Amino acid sequence: MDKIIIEGGRPLVGRIKISGAKNAALPLLAATLLAPGWHTLKNMPDLRDTRTMLLLLETMGVEWQKEDNGTIRVNSAKLASFEASYDLVKTMRASILVLGPLLARMGEARVSLPGGCAIGARPIDFHMQGLEKLGVDLTLANGYVHGRVKELKGGTVYFDIPSVTGTENMLMAAVLAKGTTVIKNAAREPEIGNLVDMLVNMGGCIEGRGTDKLVIQGVAELRPAEISIIPDRIETGTYLIAVGATGGEVTLTNCNPSHLPSLLEKLRIVGLEIKERETEIHVSCPAPLRSVDIKTLPFPGFPTDLQAQIMALMCFSKGLSLITETIFENRFMHVAELKRMGADIRIDGHSAIVKGVDRLYGARVMATDLRASASLIIAALAAEGTTEISRVYHLDRGYDDLVGKLSMVGAMIRREKE
Ligand code: EPZ
């Protein structure tokens, strides 16, 4: 396992190019199962999770080619299996995204249950209830969910919670179902819009893009897509927050400010100066940081995937911040590690009260999950002294060349074998 070593206290100055979004790339890769032929996916990030998804598709008979400049071409014409095995699914729960397209393409799917992860139990009951509404016969046995359907039929499904991958699985099944499907209380994250754009490009018929009600008219067949993966809003937010912690002046390129309405609002209250252009954000932090309260919510609310990162920032602010996590039941794993660096944080149920301190101190800390790792990177960049972060394989899941990008803007950061 590798570790990352950071000498803190240096401002970030320069330009960072944002990569394609992990949480868009994964459903778009799964959607290639819906139509044989060569799909073209542009702006593909190079992440552990996207490599895992490509490997999973390959085990089913899907071919793919990596072109230069981040374009991947994928062809599921030789799809030969409807099974997603445990050894791959256990490393990436988003593998559940092959369930819907496999049922639509082959009428059968056998996917290992993803199981929980560090941040929560991560059940898939909404996925199952939704697919059953389309006529799928689903059984759970031996750690697998096994679905069979003669012919998918349109139906109406209501999500108690606007599940992101639940909405995506339903979209990918409904697009080839017979008749009309209505998804109520659908998730509205920008990654859903990217998937809708891909499915429409393939010949799908979908109304309500960007709203919480999606209406899908099933079609008989689809054609290969040509689609560009949207920029990663969570990577964008992570670097914006890092500049808040370290000071300096950075321009983020190849990003989309409209995908981060809540974060930009909060960072301006904290005192960051943020200038938005269509595909760029210019950020600096001229003043001492003010504290701010945060409550994570489905889009367009504050993203749960940026909660750990903004908590690290609030450790350096003046005053008290109340951070409430409403999406996942165990997403405060970063708190213990931040406290080892001198942070003053108290957890009370689903909330954390952060009291700003004058400084954090470098320490040996351990990454526990993807976004907690990003929080430790931010704290280390602004801390006094040297921080060693172990188990950085968590970071590799969702950040494309993080060490390279931060080095380019002046961070003293390196990666070593543990
Ligand atoms: C997606 O996970 C993202 N992953 C997560 O990003 C993100 O944190 C999450 O959405 C929320 O925005 C991908 O897109 C690959 P949900 P997902 O279904 O779809 C409960 C990261 O760091 N729920 O929207 O699994 C669930 O327990 C990852 O990039 C059920 O109860 O999240 C949670 O409390 C982490 N039953 C809430 O709904 C279900 O069937 C929202 O979960 C499904 C979900």
Image (cartoon, rainbow, N blue to C red):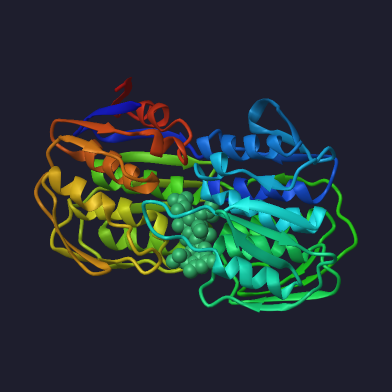
Image position, residue 212 (x, y; %): 60, 74
Q: Is residue 357 above or below residue 261?
A: above
Query: Along the horizontal axis of the image, is 167 left or right of 13?
Result: right
**Taking the image as drawn, is residue 208 in sight?**
no
* In the image, residue 11 above or below residue 105: above
**Which residue is rendered at x = 40% and y = 66% of the image?**
327
Q: Report which quarter residue 14 is drawn in.
A: top left
Image quarter (top left, top right, bottom left or bottom right) of the N terminus: top left
Left or right: 168 as drawn, with respect to 248? right
Left or right for 124, reference 307: right
Q: Furthest-front residue in view?
A: 142
Left/right of residue 14 with respect to residue 292 in the rendered view = right
Residue 100 occupies which quadrant of the picture? bottom right
Between 315 and 324, the residue placed more toward the observer is 324
- In the image, farthest residue toward the right: 220
The reply to whether residue 75 is visible in this rendering is yes
Q: Is residue 347 above or below residue 156?
A: above
